[in-house]
C-alpha cells in the first residue's frame, strides 16, 4: 500500500489507537459506562475517527496506492476499507449470528465434571464450523442451565471463553474473524485446516486441566446443591435444526463464491458485483432471510435473540476498518526494514500478534502483521504460500500470526468479540464473573505457560 518510499507520519495512527482505547477503557469508567453501552455511541465514535482518517487521505499531498492525491485517494481508501474488507466481514458475522440464533439447545443435565468437559469440547469443535460467535450463542445458555444448581460456575465460563469463543475457531476462515480477513487477503479457504495439530494439542490440554479443576470445585459444592442438581434434570432438546443446513450452505458459499475467481470445477467466473462485494454476500443474506422465515419466533425468543450484539460489532468495526488503513500502510513501509533488527522470526510474529490481540481486537491485529509478513522477503522459496489475490507470504510467519491472533484473543475480554458477549450473558444468569483485570489473571496463569509450550513445539 502507499507510494514506494513514502510512509505516513506515525501521528496519523492516533484515530486507530484512540478507537481501540475507547473499546478497552470506556466500558470500565463509571462516567462513560452507560453511555458506551448504546450502539449509537459506538457508531458516533467510529464515524468521527473514521472521518478524521479519510480526511487525512483527502488532504495529504501523496496519493494512496498510486491514485491521484485528494478525492481519488480518499475514495480508494474507502473502497479498500469498506467494500473489500468491512462488508464481506460483517455479512459473514451477521449471517452466522442470525442463523445460529435460530437453533435452540435446551435441557438440564447433571453438572458433573465430565458433562461440562464434553460440553465445552463440543463447543470448541463447533467453533471452527459455525464460528466462535455461532457456537457461543448456541451453547452458553444450556451450559448455564445445566450448572444452575451449582455454586461454583465462574471457572466453567472462563474456560468456555478460552475454547469456544477463541481457541476452537482456528480450523476454517469462518471460525474466527482474523482468519476470515486472511481469507479475504488471499489465504486459501481450506489452508487453516493445516493448523489441526496445534488446535488439537491446545484444546486437549485445556480440557484436561479444566476437568481436574472442575472435579476439585465439584467436591466443594454443598451436598444439598448436588442433590438438587441430580434431581432437577431435563432432557436435551434441539430445535431449529434446519438452520444447521443453512450454516453448511454459508460455509460452501464462502469457500466457493469468491468474486472474480472461477467456481471450483467449472470455467464460470463468480461475478464481482461491486469492488469485491459479490454473489457470495448476496447468498449469505438470502440464507439469513430463509432462516428468519423458516424458524418459529418461539425458538428465537427462547434464545433471547436480538440484534444488539451484532449491531455493536458492526458499529465498532466500521471505524476499525477505516482507521487501520494508516497503520497497515506504515507497516508496509517498515516491513522490509525488520531484517535489520532481526525481527523476522516466526516466534517474534507469534508473540507480537498475540500480545496485541490480548489487549486490542484480534482481527485488525492479524491484518497489521499479515500485511507486514507479506512485505518481507523469505529465503526459502519452498516455504512460500501463493495467495489467491496475488503475491506470496512465508508459511512459518502465517502460521505464527494465525496462532497468535486466534489463541491469544482469549487472554482478555476485548481480545475477541464473543468474549464480552458470553460474560454479559453469564452475569445476566447470576454468575459473578471476574473483572477485566481479574479475568486476565486467570488467562495469563492458565494459558500463558501453554502458549510457551505451543511456541516451542509448533512455531
Image (cartoon, rainbow, N blue to C red):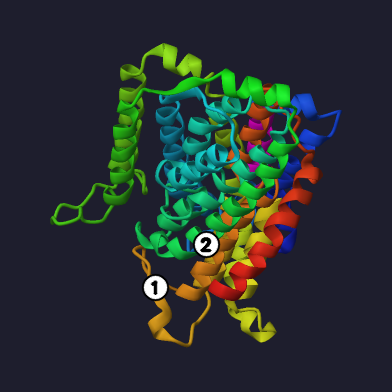
Q: Looking at the image, which residue is at 28% across and 45% down?
A: 252
Image: 36 above or below 438: above
Q: Looking at the image, which residue is at 61% across and 38% down?
A: 316
Q: Indicate the quadrant where residue 184 lies.
A: bottom left
Estimate the x, y position of residue 40 in percent, counting from the top left: 65, 25
Image: 337 above or below 292: below
Question: Is 454 a magenta residue?
Answer: no
- Of 38 and 45, which appears nearest the observer? 38
Q: Looking at the image, which residue is at 41% across and 12% down?
A: 297
Q: Secondary structure at mark 2?
A: helix
Q: Earlier in the sequence, mark 1 or mark 2?
A: 2
Which residues, given as a range, are shown in magenta?
A: 40-53
Q: Indicate the quadrant where residue 413 lies.
A: top right
Pointer 1: what residue?
385
Pointer 2: what residue?
201
Query: In the rendered image, is residue 273 in sight?
Result: no
Image: 295 above or below 151: above
- Between circles 1 and 2, the one closer to the viewer is 2
Query: In the rendered image, is residue 87 in sight?
Result: yes
Estimate the x, y position of residue 248 in percent, counting from the top left: 31, 39
- Of 72 and 244, which appears nearest the observer? 244
Label 1: few (<14), some (14–19) or many (≥20) C-alpha neighbours in 10 Å: some
Estimate the x, y position of residue 352 in percent, counting from the top left: 66, 66
Q: Secondary structure at mark 1?
A: strand
Point out the image quarter for the C terminus. Answer: bottom right
Amino acid at each position: 500500500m502507499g507510494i514506494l518510499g513514502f510512509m505516513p507520519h506515525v501521528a496519523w495512527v492516533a484515530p486507530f489507537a484512540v478507537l481501540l482505547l475507547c473499546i478497552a477503557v470506556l466500558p470500565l469508567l463509571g462516567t462513560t459506562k452507560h453511555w458506551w453501552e448504546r450502539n449509537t455511541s459506538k457508531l458516533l465514535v467510529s464515524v468521527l475517527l473514521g472521518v478524521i482518517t479519510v480526511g487525512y487521505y483527502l488532504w495529504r499531498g501523496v496519493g494512496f496506492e498510486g491514485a491521484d492525491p485528494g478525492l481519488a485517494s480518499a475514495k480508494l481508501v474507502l473502497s479498500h476499507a469498506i467494500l473489500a474488507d468491512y462488508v464481506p466481514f460483517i455479512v459473514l458475522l451477521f449471517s452466522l449470528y442470525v442463523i445460529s440464533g435460530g437453533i435452540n439447545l435446551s435441557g438440564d443435565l447433571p453438572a458433573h465434571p465430565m458433562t461440562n468437559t464434553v460440553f465445552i469440547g463440543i463447543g470448541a469443535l463447533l467453533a471452527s464450523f459455525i464460528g466462535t460467535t455461532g457456537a457461543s450463542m448456541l451453547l452458553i445458555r444450556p451450559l448455564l442451565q445445566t450448572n444452575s444448581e451449582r455454586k461454583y460456575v465462574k471457572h466453567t465460563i472462563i474456560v468456555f471463553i478460552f475454547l469456544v469463543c477463541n481457541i476452537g475457531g482456528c480450523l476454517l476462515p469462518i471460525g474466527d474473524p482474523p482468519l476470515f480477513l486472511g481469507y479475504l487477503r488471499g489465504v486459501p479457504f481450506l489452508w487453516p485446516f493445516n493448523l489441526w495439530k496445534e488446535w488439537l494439542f491446545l484444546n486437549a490440554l485445556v480440557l484436561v486441566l479444566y476437568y481436574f479443576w472442575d472435579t476439585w470445585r465439584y467436591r466443594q459444592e454443598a451436598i444439598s446443591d448436588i442433590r438438587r442438581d441430580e434431581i432437577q434434570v431435563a432432557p436435551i432438546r434441539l430445535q431449529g435444526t434446519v438452520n444447521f443446513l443453512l450454516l453448511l450452505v454459508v460455509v460452501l458459499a464462502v469457500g466457493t463464491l469468491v468474486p472474480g475467481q472461477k467456481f471450483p470445477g467449472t470455467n464460470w467466473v463468480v461475478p464481482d458485483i461491486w469492488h469485491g462485494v459479490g454473489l457470495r454476500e448476496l447468498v449469505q443474506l438470502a440464507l439469513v432471510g430463509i432462516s428468519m422465515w423458516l424458524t418459529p419466533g418461539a425458538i428465537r425468543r427462547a434464545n433471547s435473540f436480538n440484534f444488539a450484539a451484532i449491531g455493536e460489532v458492526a458499529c465498532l468495526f466500521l471505524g476499525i476498518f477505516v482507521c487501520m488503513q494508516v497503520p497497515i500502510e506504515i507497516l508496509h513501509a517498515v516491513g522490509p526494514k525488520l531484517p535489520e533488527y532481526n525481527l523476522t522470526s516466526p516466534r517474534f510474529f507469534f508473540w507480537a500478534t498475540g500480545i496485541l490481540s490480548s489487549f486490542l481486537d484480534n482481527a485488525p491485529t492479524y491484518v497489521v502483521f499479515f500485511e507486514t509478513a507479506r512485505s518481507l522477503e523469505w529465503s526459502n522459496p519452498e516455504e512460500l504460500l501463493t495467495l489467491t489475490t496475488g503475491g506470496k507470504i512465508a508459511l512459518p510467519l502465517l502460521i505464527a500470526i494465525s496462532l497468535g491472533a486466534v489463541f491469544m484473543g482469549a487472554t482478555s475480554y476485548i481480545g475477541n468479540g464473543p468474549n464480552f458477549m458470553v460474560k454479559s450473558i453469564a452475569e445476566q444468569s447470576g454468575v459473578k464473573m471476574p473483572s477485566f483485570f481479574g479475568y486476565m489473571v486467570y488467562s495469563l496463569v492458565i494459558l500463558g505457560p501453554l502458549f510457551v509450550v505451543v511456541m516451542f513445539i509448533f512455531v
